[in-house]
Image (spheres, rainbow, N blue to C red):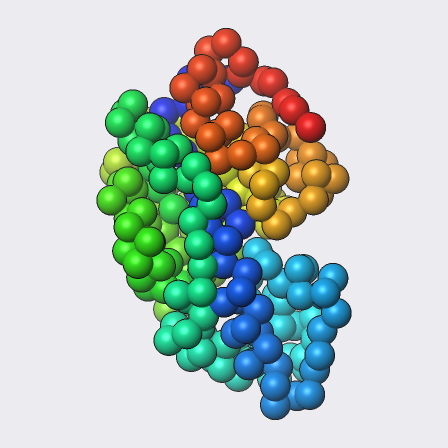
Amino acid sequence: MKEIQAVLFDLDGTLVDSEPGILASFAKAFEPYGITLSQEQKRSLLGPPLKDSFARFLPPDQVERAVAAYRAFYETNGIYQCTVYDGVETMLSSLHANGFVLGLATCKLRKAARTMLEFLHLDQYFDYLGGSVPELDLETKAQVIDDVLAQPCFAGKTAVMVGDRDNDMQGAAACGLPVIAAGYGYGTPQELQAFSPVYYAKTPMDVSSWLLGQNDNETEETT
């Protein structure tokens, strides 16, 4: 594998713990339907695109309405119910200072993702913020990743994707990117290791340590 020069990050479960705001927004959207979810079902909602999640519980003709209700609540309430994982800002600062090109690749609406990163003062470390823009046909993880990689700052760079759920791994694979598994996020070890990540990070600082020392441990995996 060539030396990595650029890093794409997922947002929820990789940079921030946004579970409280996400689940509160799902609860609000499900309220009119009288749907109460188990803890396991709630955890399964953390990561995948909204349409995919709602389609598991609602008829097809109700999905768009539920997505709109979720976003209306999330953009004014849920988005601020989040915390940065310990070590994330140090990780981003270190990679940025060492010349890595950094991009965000999230299925969250790009506008909402930008608001969250600005609120948490993390936007300063990124060269490009990529996210879902339905009107531009940017909704799946693969579409968002492709959009990020198409930006001039990523031209000619060897990149890696860092994510915590299987949809991150699948999107990266569809775009030909190796992946670093964020094992401290919402996914299980089994879920992530099934995709043979080049590295399994137990903490955010593991990500930067591995990238900064990649010539010595290119294909190391930890459990």
Observer able to see residue 110: no
- The structure residue drawn at horizontal position 45% and vertical position 70%, both measured from the top left corner, is 78
**Outermost residue toward the bottom in this view:** 32
Relative to 74, residue 137 above or below:
above
Residue 66, percent across and down? 55, 80
Decide if residue 17 is on the left or right side of residue 121. Answer: right
| For residue 84, above or below residue 173 | below
Residue 186: image location, x then y, percent: 61, 50
Residue 196 visible in the displayed image: yes
Location of residue 29 in the rendering, given as x and y in whole percent from the top left corner? 56, 81
- The residue sitting at 46% across, 41% down in the picture is 86
Residue 129's spot in the image, x, y percent?
32, 50
Q: Is residue 3 left or right of residue 176?
A: left
Quarter of the image with the C terminus in it: top right
The residue furthest top is 216
Closer to the camera, 122 or 150? 122
